[in-house]
Image (spheres, coloured by chain):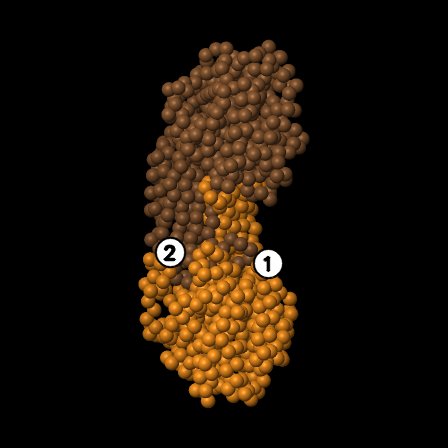
Chain colours: A orange, B brown
Amino acid sequence: MADKIEAYIDANQERFIEELKELMRIPSVSAQRAHDADTRACADWLVAHFKALGLEAELVDKGGQPIVRALGKGKSDKRVLVYGHYDVQPEDPLDEWKTPPFEPTIRDGILFGRGSTDDKGQVFTHIKAVEALLKTEGELPCEVLFLLEGEEECGGDALGRYIRDTKDELKPDVVIVSDSTMYDENTPAITYGLRGMAMFEFTIKGPDRDVHSGAYGGGIANPAMVLAQILSACVAPDGKVLVPGFYDNVAPLEQWESDSMAKLGFDDQAFVGELSVSHPHGEPGHSTLERIWMRPTFEINGMFGGYTGDGSKTIIPASATAKISCRLVPHQDPTRIRDLLAEHIRSVCPDTVTLEMSDFATSPPVLFDVNNQAFRAAQEALRQGFGSECTFIRCGGSIPVVSTFVEQLGCPVVLMGFGLDSDGPHSPNEHFSLDSFIRGTKASTHLLRTI
Amino acid sequence: MADKIEAYIDANQERFIEELKELMRIPSVSAQRAHDADTRACADWLVAHFKALGLEAELVDKGGQPIVRALGKGKSDKRVLVYGHYDVQPEDPLDEWKTPPFEPTIRDGILFGRGSTDDKGQVFTHIKAVEALLKTEGELPCEVLFLLEGEEECGGDALGRYIRDTKDELKPDVVIVSDSTMYDENTPAITYGLRGMAMFEFTIKGPDRDVHSGAYGGGIANPAMVLAQILSACVAPDGKVLVPGFYDNVAPLEQWESDSMAKLGFDDQAFVGELSVSHPHGEPGHSTLERIWMRPTFEINGMFGGYTGDGSKTIIPASATAKISCRLVPHQDPTRIRDLLAEHIRSVCPDTVTLEMSDFATSPPVLFDVNNQAFRAAQEALRQGFGSECTFIRCGGSIPVVSTFVEQLGCPVVLMGFGLDSDGPHSPNEHFSLDSFIRGTKASTHLLRTI
């Protein structure tokens, strides 16, 4: 039977890819109000697609972007909840894309375009797995409930509200999430830990307008310089975060993790070489892999103030702004970290300027116990789909909804990603291996049949 | 005779103001290529205006924006060179203008619009002074040579080249410059010192694209953070510049300067209150006025990197850039300061990123001996035109061409400004007092008759 299903996938892969390209052409950029109609159109496209496959599908409105909900009945009552998101990151900087972000293009077996790996391409593996099972076996082995949100990239909480409101009805036996990565292109992986997030921005305000740097230079504080000085008081040149208490509750590395990481043979030079960076850099006393997976960070995502056009303009800027995101790890508490960050920045900001801080968006870090049946079934399904052994990894990124699943649903959450960090999920020229797309689809059919 | 000339100015002031508004409507933004045709049109307008007054006028092309040259013969052979510039700063941020930058508007006797005070309005006092002298006396008391450049706001050197190439022909007895300020609205002033400039930008480059702050955060250096750390290594939180050797050659304050400044009764709180800033700030151990006039600075004019749009984008930026201008004072050498700045930034930049530094634009600081006949004549002309005593001041700004006059022409340069720092010369809602415009025009006629 498994052979017949895999054969169906092989026979139909060209069409699967064309359908995915159609989905990727819809610029569902949830962070930008100008794209609200597109984001809605993308949700509508998915509902229509699920209905065409024979699933019950609808849009759920919990405020914000709609949730796509689709249910396929199964042979057993066991219910698998497949999570994903259909929204994508903004495309800028647009001029760095080799082909347009919303015109999917295949080069050398790689599909380029916004959403290819994050997360339309990965979500589509499970949709096509359901199709393959239905077309070959006539019915699904278990009940499959898709919940695809449209606010993952903009920090919205519509799906969180939906899960909290309907948890007594949802009751899945397991949640499957494909919004993470393999260890490398030949090593499928299950992610057992995610970093959390504390995200905010702050603005330093000085004079009530940009003023002449000759007439006023030396007389008043420069908001851009104050911003730089505050940021420097948050992270030392060696990479250590200087916010008091920041590292207090970070969980130490366990022995099996240390052993497992050693086996992976992570290559620092390959890691930075892929980015054209000469050396890795970060908190002293930890390996690069440890720093990415298991250590918290303080990163500037964006920074601006004063004249940013061509040439020069000799002013003292009226204000300067930094957009910050901190990645959090077990067992840091996002609320406590938020308070520590806000307190530290307020304490180092001088009274020659005014400080405005945004609200914080936070999500807790997640850590799973890998010893359970769902994880073992997923390991085997990935081994079959990809034809190679599956490893356990952590992920430096954050999937806020995963902690909601953990808290609200109390069932195992299996993060089986088919992407790679080098796919450039938030960058220009985002891409996804079509080979991984097909293998992932096969792995999904194996998992739905054995879980 | 002086009464008759002043009466002519009073009788024609409405028309003078309308003509100035016409000049200000031409958006001669020299820094922006999109405005090249406007900048040229502005120069053409001035040539036509001079010709209508009976002067020999032409455009001089030395590459870059054209120079407006106009010569009026006089009763005596004495030659006064009047310098000014017809180009203006960019208008951004546009949304902070109460009325459009290039639609001059009068409110309560104040003329608002880009170029009103810097420098079209100030230049126009001398043009109208020449008109008043010609219309009332039939001829000019001395030869008046206007040289009006179109590259003051973009650091161009066309006028510098022209002066160097024709200095043996130019040979003025005195140069008059009105591109500075009065001490306050009731106190006309002659500026005897200008700060110089060392201007540059530098970029910190990290990964070859913006990358996901989850996947890579903790693994590589963040270029925006490195930029902030380098900037913090250039200026201490107390305002002191940390570049080694920066203050080495700064001239100490002389006793007469100290006495003169004390008499002015500079009001720190009024100075910052006008900007809605709570406290002054700058290098410890020096008064606010001293810091603005006589101490060098390191200012960030603009800074940018990563995601600067609405909402958030969780990336590590590929690069971050700072635009810097240092104001220099006697006897700092711009070339030496350039080398010190470049060396310091290179020395504090870590090898986890790459550093790209632009060429430097520099101009030397200027300091005049106030004990000469031209300064005394100007003092008296200002006293007559404004009806109050004239003081000697320094200026925190830079007028690069003044040092070219000093070096190439070897004659006194009289900086008699009619603006105020609070006119917002490089800011939104730039403005100029029409009262100062008329009084300045009268003072110019007195000076041309007595110099």
What is the crowding at mark 1: few (fewer than 14 residues within 10 Å), some, or many (at least 20)?
few
Residue B169, given in percent of the width and then of the height, sits at 39, 19
Q: Is residue B121 above or below residue A397?
A: above
Query: Amino acid under label 2?
Result: Asp
Q: Residue at x 50, y 59 (%)?
A: A91
Q: CA distance from mark 1 to mark 2?
A: 41 Å
Q: Which chain does the residue under circle 2 lie in?
A: A
Residue A189, given in percent of the width and then of the height, sits at 41, 75
Q: Is residue A95 visible?
A: yes
Q: In this rendered view, identify the residue nearer to me: A156 or B389.
A: A156
- The residue that disc 2 covers is A238
Tell me if B128 is positioned left or right of A299 in this view.
right
Q: Is residue A76 above or below residue A289?
A: below
Q: How many marks?
A: 2
Q: Residue at x 43, y 30 (%)?
A: B61
Name the disc covering residue B252, or none: none
Query: Amino acid under label 1?
Result: Ala
Q: Is residue A208 above or below residue A390?
A: above
Q: In this rendered view, identify the residue nearer to me: A215 or B88.
A: B88
Q: Residue at x 50, y 33 (%)?
A: B40
Name the disc covering residue A34, or none: 1
Query: Which of the marked residues, 1 or 2, is nearer the chain's N terminus?
Result: 1
